Image (tube, grey):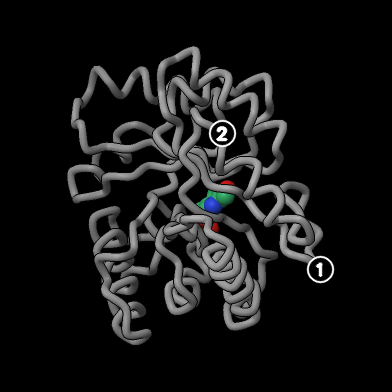
Amino acid sequence: MLGFYAMTIPENLAAVLERIRSSAVRAGRDPRGIKLVAVTKTVGLPDIVEAINRGATILGESRVQEAQKKISNFKFQISNPEIEWHLIGHLQKNKARHAVGLFDLIHTVDSVGLAEEIGRQAAKAGKSQRVLVQVKLSGEEAKHGAAERDLMETLGKISVMKDLKLEGLMTIPPYFEDPGLVRPYFRRLRELRDEGSRQGFDLPELSMGMSNDFEVAVEEGATMVRIGSAIFG
Ligand SMILES: *Cc1c(COP(=O)(O)O)cnc(C)c1O
């Protein structure tokens, strides 16, 4: 019998997509409202190409430098205008220029200062940079993320930056063996989004959920799930 990690990438990918679909249906949502970000950090090019050949279109990387090497190699291997690269790891200001050059969407804007620097670099590059604001939910020990307490003020400042396109919120909750325990964090992010909407911010995207807990995230309103090990082993 094959164990989970002995399954192939196409099998894993199909299983993940099916689990996203059934969680959406269970929650009364349209499965087409949920995008899969295939997390390719530490994954080699052949495996990435295999995932793309099986329908993965959004690839998530957590480090600018690693992504830089991959994306430049990748351009020789395949040119598919539908492929998007997303930055899902922490971004330092001094790497903002590279990040703007590489990524379609940056999930990890965690301060007004970082947003300003990304905006400056986007202006130089003549690009409108799509971003999400990463939120550190209260009670969390996470290192990065904008504080929940003054999130509306932060969103107010970032949403008017002319070279950025603010599309939503992202969070990385603490890890729990039991995915049910993470549900309050996902729910809280959605509530913050709803509060933002009431204040006039357009925040369609909620980036939340990883291999261990994406079904719960979908039930709570995720529009982007970031999945690595369940696809690549
Ligand atoms: C690595 C990573 C993921 C994917 O984690 P898996 O548990 O392998 O699915 C998702 N989001 C972020 C921010 C990550 O760093």
- The residue located at (64%, 79%) in the rendering is 184
Q: Is mark 2 within 8 Å of ligand 1?
A: no
Question: Which sits in the foreground, 60 or 116?
Answer: 116
Q: Quadrant of residue 224?
A: bottom left
Residue 97 image label: none
Q: CA distance from mark 1 to mark 2?
A: 29 Å
Q: Is residue 145 among the parts visible in the rendering? A: yes
Q: Residue at x 78, y 48 (%)?
A: 143
Vertical arrangement, residue 124 with respect to residue 159, above or below = above
Residue 51, image x, y percentages: 27, 46
**121 to 188, vertically: above or below:** above
Q: Residue at x 48, y 63 (%)?
A: 211
In this rendering, does residue 43 appear at all? Answer: no
Place of residue 111 in the rendered image (x, y in percent of width and height, measured from the top left): 71, 40
Q: Quadrant of residue 75?
A: top left
Q: Tag 2's secondary structure?
A: loop
Give the mark nearer the N terminus: 1 vs 2. Answer: 1
- As shown in the figure, which amino acid type bears the numbered disc 1? Gly
The nearer-to-camera label among 1 and 2 is 2
Query: Which residue is disc 2 drawn over?
Result: 161
Q: Looking at the figure, which quarter contains the N terminus?
A: bottom left
Q: Is residue 231 left or right of residue 42?
A: left
Going 66% across and 72% down the picture, which residue do you hit?
176
Residue identified by numbered label 1:
139
Depicted 114 relative to depicted 200: above or below: above
* Location of residue 159 in the rendering, given as x and y in whole percent from the top left corner: 56, 43
Q: Is residue 196 left or right of residue 233?
A: right
Q: Determine the image quadrant of residue 108.
A: top right
